[in-house]
Amino acid sequence: MDTNSWISILGFIATVVLAFTVGVSYGGIVRKITARIQNRVGPPVYQNFFDIFKLYSKSTAVNHGWMQHLGPAFAITASVTSLMFIPVLNGQGEFWFANLNFKGDLIFLLYMMVFGSLGMALGAGQTGNPNSAIGVSRGLSQMVGYEIPWVLALVALMLQTKSTSITGIMDYQIAHGTWMMFESPLAFIAALMAMLGMFHYAPFDVTFAPAELSSGPASEFGGKYLAMMMTSGSIFAFVKLALFVDIFMGGASNLIMLVVKTFLLYMVPVLYGIVSPRYRTEQSIRYFWGWPTLIGVLGVLYVVFVR
Amino acid sequence: MNSLLLIILILLGGAILAYLSKRISPMLSSIVSFLAITSAALVFFFLANDQEIVKISLGDFVLEWGLNAYSWIFGAMVMVMATLASLFSIFYMKGKDRLGYFNLNFDLSVMAMMGILFSLDWVSFFIFWEIMTWSSFLIIVYNGISEGKIGIKYMIFSAIGGYAMLLALVVTRSQIHSFLITDLIHSFAGFSGNMQALLGLLFLTAFGVKSAVMPLHVWAPRAYADSPMSYTAIFSGLLSKMGIFGFGIMLIAVFSHSVDGTIFVYREVLAWLAAITSVIATFYAVIQTDAKRLLAYSSIAQLGYIVMGLAIGTKLAVMAALFLAIMHAIYKGTLFMVVGAVERQTGITDMTRLGALIRKMPWTFFAALLSIIALAGIPPLGGFVGKWMLYESLITSDHYFLIILAFLSSTAAFLYSFRFLFGIFLGQEEKEFENVKEVPFTMVLPMLIGSLLLVVFGTFPGLLFKPLASAMSFLGMGDVSWNMSMLSNGWGDHVDTLDVINSVVIIFVLVAIFLGLKNRKRTRYVSTKDIHTSGEIPTENENLTYAVDFYKPFERAIAPVMKRKMDFYYNKFGEGLETFFDFLRRVYTGNGQTYAFYVIVFLVILIVFSQQIFF
Amino acid sequence: MVISPVHYIAVPLLAAFLMPLLAKIHRELTRIVPGLVILYLGYVSVVLMNQVMAHGTIVEVIAGWNAPWGINLVYSPFTGFLASMMTAMAFVIWLYSYRFKKVDSQPALKYFILFMMLVTGTIGIVLTGDIFNFFVFLEITAISSYSLTAFYRDRDGAEAAFKYLLIGSFASAFILIAILLLYTQVGTLNMAQIAVRMHDVPTHMKITILILFLVGLGIEAEMFPLNGWAPDAYSQAPSPVGVTFAALVVKAGVYGLIRIIFTLFDVHGAYEYLIVMGAITLVMAELAAIRQKSLKRMLAYSSIGQMGVVMIAFGIGTNEAVFGAIFLMFNHAVIKGLLFMSGSYLVYNTPNKEIQYLSGYGMKMPLISLFFSLGALAIVGLPPFAGFWSKLYILIAAADNQMIGLIALILGVSIVEIVYYFRVVGRLYFGKPSKGSIMQKPTYGGVIAMSLLAIVILVVGFYPDVITPYIHNAADALLDKAQYIHSVLPNADLSQIQNLK
Amino acid sequence: MPNDKNSQKIVDIIKNAARKHSLFVLAYGTGCGAIEIPPTMTSRYDAERFGIRGMATPRQADVLLVTGYLATKTLKRVIRAYEQMQDPKYVIGFGSCTINGGMYWDSYNTIKLLDKYIPVDVYINGCMPRPEAVITGFIELQKLIAEGKADGATKYKENLDWYRANQKKVIKNWNMPDYNW
Amino acid sequence: MDTIDYYQIMSIGVYGSAIGLILIGLYAVLMKKHLTKIVIGLSIIDAGINLLFIAIGYISNGTAPIYSSQGIDLVKTGTPMVDPVPQALVLTAIVIGFGVTAVALSLVIRLYRHHNTARIDQIKSLKW
């Protein structure tokens, strides 16, 4: 192997570490913000690192079959693979975080992200806990809900930029010196509404509802399994945010911009979630198939007929 | 001897031999059938080439058979999957009665499919088409489920399709005095607009029935579900592809010669119908509790994608459709075999009762997992390649609302994909299935081969692109560029499957080995009764399975769409017709005198109106 | 002895009258002699058909009186084909009815006498070249059919027979009047002569005669408003007789109809009339069939429907269409024969011959069910069975004449046909036999008969060329009116004759 | 003491630090003690700032919080929940009832000393202990964890027979799965 | 020319009665409910047709078409011979009619035995 390969492998690792760090920190920040809104002090920002580390250090004594091992492994695989195909920074010469982002596109990413959910779902299914199954059922149903406005928004972008790849959309934004959220605002709104569901914060947290489902799919996952799930969840959060930033906010030219943009974006579902009650599954599906879808359709029409 | 004729004869002979050898031993019958299909497959792959032409003169017609790039790819698919299914069938059908009857029809179906693919003229096409229809009908009624009604439904719809084709082909002949398919292709442009519209409608109806496009799909779910699974593997995987094969010829080769705009409308309408089919069928698949039904509806949905691709008709779309067609044959075939294996070992396919077979039938689960991943279109397996190309083609050809329907359907497909795996292989262990064993090797092998193929084609889709490209250029689409492992759309975006699979595999191996397997060594298996139940210890008979109304919330959300089934309208229509017929036949009053009266009245009418009638 | 067409009529008639005497010698002779007779007729057919294929139409002059004064038998490729087909079917029917239990339980002697009469009558109808002779054979056929319909001594047989008789008497009356009027106009009874002189007949008279013929023969050919008797007779007659109706009697009726229209008259409207009435017959019969509870009645209606298709095809009148029509007549004889034979064993012991009791018979009577399924596949015209080819030819002919609506009608009705046939087939292979259903073991003769028919269906289906040359000749012979007249009356003036289509 | 802080390996120190700061609690809300948990967790006392967090299932939890008296019937469930937890795991006995039966000291069907049945790391006394006391108890537990002294699980494993004997004495219909990890 | 009128009247009478007979027969067949009456109606139709035949075959002043010396003489002198064919046909038709009537009556008997009625509108067990 030549030097370039080694450096790119290092780049992979750096990306993963970055995603993990940012994702986990965001988790801590969310907890802190939640606490502050609830007039609490809240845990330290680095609390989630403790949690994940502790979970990794726990022993894992029991399993319910080999799918329980593979489930979290699938999830991590999916999250890391998706990360590989996301342009973290938009500089063309950027070397460290380039990874494989010229070799995939949006549709590929959509499916790759589902891979993780499906793996998780299978792992949860293997445990035989009815709560897990219920959670999976809810989660997948809800996914069908938010995918529609999300895809509508993406279609609007693709039609406008005549490109289905993320780098293509970023190049378009750079070339036109604008952000897609201003270019096709309707699509952005639809995507934002879909994003609420994507992060599974309230009011769309019926999947994990701890009070009724004893945390749903994760209910039989302790120790390392849970740690892996949290890891992949954190990375996924970063992936989604980075994707949003890339396609709607023109990407980020350096890490600080990235952090700022993703953080701002992240606050939308978080803040909306903290003050919201919980929807039932069919309510959330109907919600997503209502206004967000309509706005998405309008967004597509806007792109087709106005632009 | 001509290898095409040889293939047909081997299959025909195999069918008859299989029927006769049942007298000696039922098992022998299945083995004979398997051997016949295998040897036909060998002949196909090693001897058949596109130079050969068979000409058979029957009556006043000359039947012409030949092989071309387009039919070769379908033929290869048929032969491979039929071989796998028949291998699977040996043990699956063991111990069932009337095996001779089953194998006869099995081989006849395969023969008919090969015949359709070889046909260069419409007469032999139609002959084989109908052989396929009735042989599959006879297998549908073989299991004797559902009071024979589903067989009738299948037969009616097949007849509608078949007769539409017959009508189309006699009309064609009256126009061009030839039954050759190539002649139709070349002279289609010369037809009048009305004739083009009529022929288009008829042919699309004909192929639409077999590929279960929306208003003509009602036969499919039950027909797929009620046949023996080893047959459904080719019924859903291959027989339906014959409709796709026909669509390919029609939509690409024939309609592209149309100068009128009518055909364009057909394309759009067909694409929309296919999209709606895929959405509705997916919804129905989601709410099924029987694994067979689930897969049956899923088949309809998948066929919807394929038809959509063909209807869009850009290079990428056609490539996607054909690729998906082949993938669908493989993974749906494998999945039906999986269900067959489960059915054979447990006796049921009801997902509300099955569960946790993963420990009992790990290989079956493995095959099912890979197939489901492919079915759901998740990278890196073969299904993804097809779906990616389909979506890209939809976007690049400005079908921006179709893509939403396609996405809705494919996202909802995750629901039933999970349901399938969960319902059968995961979840709570049931005491009922304590002693279930893995199926015999000859049943595992075809499933594993099927899933292996998915992996291979997912990694190197170019293996399929190559023959597909030549098939498409045969159909008149010109040169199609392709790459061994690079997918690209018209806008210059691309996905590198090799990179995808590399990264997935590497990361997965890393994660699985260093985290998962390490855990596994230290952990101890506990039964699925040992779960968090708020400290309560579940008793032996306590049902902890969440299986009934699995997607109830989703069901509630989509309730408005599901209010009426298409069946309902057809049944009402049928009932109305029958009532009308019942009314009509009352002219036969049973009174001899009335009949005599009819005679006199008829005579008088004839005489009175003789001026109008006979001059 | 020189083989001549007259043997077709003389031998079975003689056998029919000798049979009471033979029965006195040995009872078994009553069963065997008809077979031998028909075998002999088969031999005659083979010899004559070869002759006809080689040398053209044979005209047999009876009792030395030449045409147009004497009665003659015309053995053209067309009539010869029909006669041979009827002979073959008669042989199969004999095989089937040999030791057929229900026939045997009634006096077999009567049955076979009537059967021989029926064979004589139908073949006579086809072969004769004399219009009054035609009438006589028609009556022989009719009377033996009435008696055979009422052969079983239950009340429904008699009822069916009486209806048949009532309508049949009308038929004979009309035909008689028509012959009478024709005679007053042309002064001859020889068909060829009539054909020659027909153009001199005033049009309105011609039409009136034609209408009388059409109605009278329409009754025999089961045309729509005139076919009230048919389902009853088919369903109540003994099964072999049902086959006979489908294979022989109806064919004779249709033959009469087309002979009148094609050869005797030169009225264009008659062809359209045939198409329209054929279509109406087809539709009404198939629609009536779909709701039948009784299997045999269903088959009867289906038979009527097929005759409708035949009429349509003849009405189209091109060579291809006629070819298809004759092919369909042949196929219908064979396939409907198989269906009646196997169907009657299926419903042998069921109350009212009802279909609903047939559940699961496919497992109990595999062979018979297979035959029935084969017949069902073939009759709806599914390839690669015999029925497909005839349908294809007819449709092609219709398409060539731009009758797309008609094709759609035929195909649409075929779907109805599929519905009711496959309802039965589906039921055969579904479920368990209902309680108390008694399977009837078929006789060996019956199995052989059905196997023969099945083999014919398969052979013709896979390789129609075994039969198409004959049918081609037959179609040519039917359409070539001048040739017909010439062969009967070598000196006739053919200047006025033109082939209609 | 052999389990001296100095005798811990450096890995253990890090692990214990993480464990100490991240206590996932499975609150077994028996008796009146459960009512004290909400104030402990919510704004006023905010136990989350110590990394204490409620969890829904025993698989995910580190700390079993037994909040009050245990009837013999509920004991079985507690044992079950405890055995389903993954190592390392800790038990906090909450309120007097877990120490000596409290006000149920003479009840025929409550157990008097929780430690006889499952190993308790920290007791919080009081009837009921206030949230401050609860937090104090948790901090005590954190100290023990940091020192590596919270080894109830090890004790349970080593003395399983003794615990089992005690448990079986009060639980008549014994049908628990084996515990052998 | 008395004779001509006579023949005209005769022929009108014969044709009229033949057609009359047919119509009467038709009336009986179509309107009467009793089986026997229907059979009688059929016979009457037959008789009418036969009469019609004879009437058509008859040529005024014609001689009987019998192969006899007297007949040949008459023909030679120009006396027309009555057409022999219709008469021959009528013979056949009468025989056939007889046969049909016999069968019909036997059927009537059997129907009456089984149904205990001879009304055709009540014998409708086979219909539709």
Image (cartoon, grey):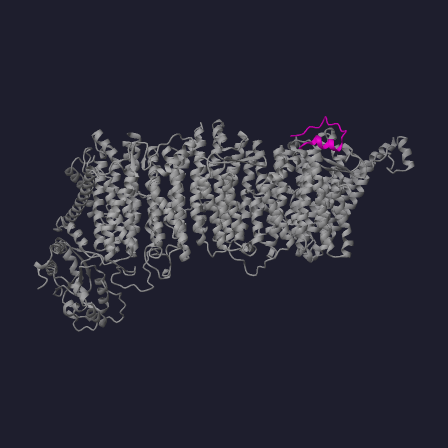
User: In the rendered view, does C373 fall on the left or right side of B258?
Assistant: right
**Res B485 quadrant in image:** top left
Pinpoint residue C221: horizontal percent, then vertical percent: 66, 42
The C terminus of chain B is located in which quarter?
top right
From the viewer's perspective, is B260 left or right of B497? right
C7 w.r.t. A179: above or below: below
Residue A273 is situated, as x and y percent measured from the top left of the image, at 21, 47
From where the camera sits, is residue C442 visible?
yes
Magenta stretch?
C479-501
* Residue B594 seen by the camera: no
- Please say whether residue B94 is one of the residues in the magenta stretch: no
Does residue C481 belong to the magenta stretch?
A: yes
Instruction: Report the residue at 46% width, 54% height from top.
Output: B93
Q: Position of residue A231 (x, y in %)?
A: 21, 48
Tell whether C497 sits left or right of A260.
Answer: right
Give the image location of residue E36, x and y in percent: 73, 51
**Figure label count:** 0
- Of residue A162 and residue A191, the one placed in the foreground of this image is A162
Question: Magenta region's main secondary structure?
Answer: loop
Q: Quadrant of residue A244?
A: top left
Between residue A219 and residue C450, name the one nearer to us: C450
